[in-house]
Amino acid sequence: MTPRPLDILDQVLNRQPVIISLKGGREIRGILQGYDVHMNLVLDRAEEEVDGTAQKLGTLIVRGDNVIYITPSVE
């Protein structure tokens, strides 16, 4: 059986970093703490790379309609 999108998110929940691409060209990386069916996300240890420097954002709530895609980070 092919995994469903929310099943994949369950596999990385509280485990490994994810990369989230947002409208406006921003990318945020952090540990996924939670989500809902609207793709609202809670990230811990969130950071965004700005001009080659990682800017730490801490705990972050991302509204689902700003999310273009979310993917597990390769480390």
Image: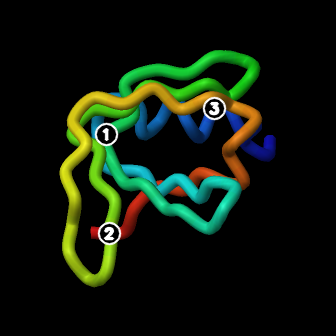
Badge 3 marks a residue whose secondary structure is helix
Asked which quadrant contains residue 66, the reply is top right
The circle on residue 31 is 1
Quadrant containing the N terminus is top right
Of marks 2 and 1, which one's residue comes earlier in the chain? 1
47 or 12: which is nearer to us?
Answer: 47
Question: Looking at this rendering, what residue extends furthest in the right direction?
Answer: 1
Badge 1 marks a residue whose secondary structure is strand
Q: What residue appears at the point 46 percent right and 20 percent down from the top-left corner?
A: 34
Q: Residues within 10 Å of mark 1 (few under 14, many from 20)?
A: many
Q: Which residue is mark 2?
A: 49
Q: Amino acid at mark 3?
A: Asp
Q: Which residue is mark 3?
A: 7
* Front tag of 2 and 1: 2
Q: Amino acid at mark 1?
A: Ile
Q: Horizontal and vertical percent for residue 35?
A: 55, 21
Of marks 2 and 3, which one's residue comes earlier in the chain? 3
* Front tag of 1 and 3: 1
Find the distance from the CA under tag 2 to the CA under tag 3: 28 Å
Please state if 26 lies on the left or on the right of 13 as rendered.
right
14 or 52: which is nearer to us?
Answer: 52
Image height of 28 relative to 53, above or below: above
Badge 2 marks a residue whose secondary structure is strand
Report the label total: 3
Find the distance from the CA under tag 2 to the CA under tag 1: 15 Å
Coloured how?
rainbow
Please state if 5 lies on the left or on the right of 48 as rendered.
right
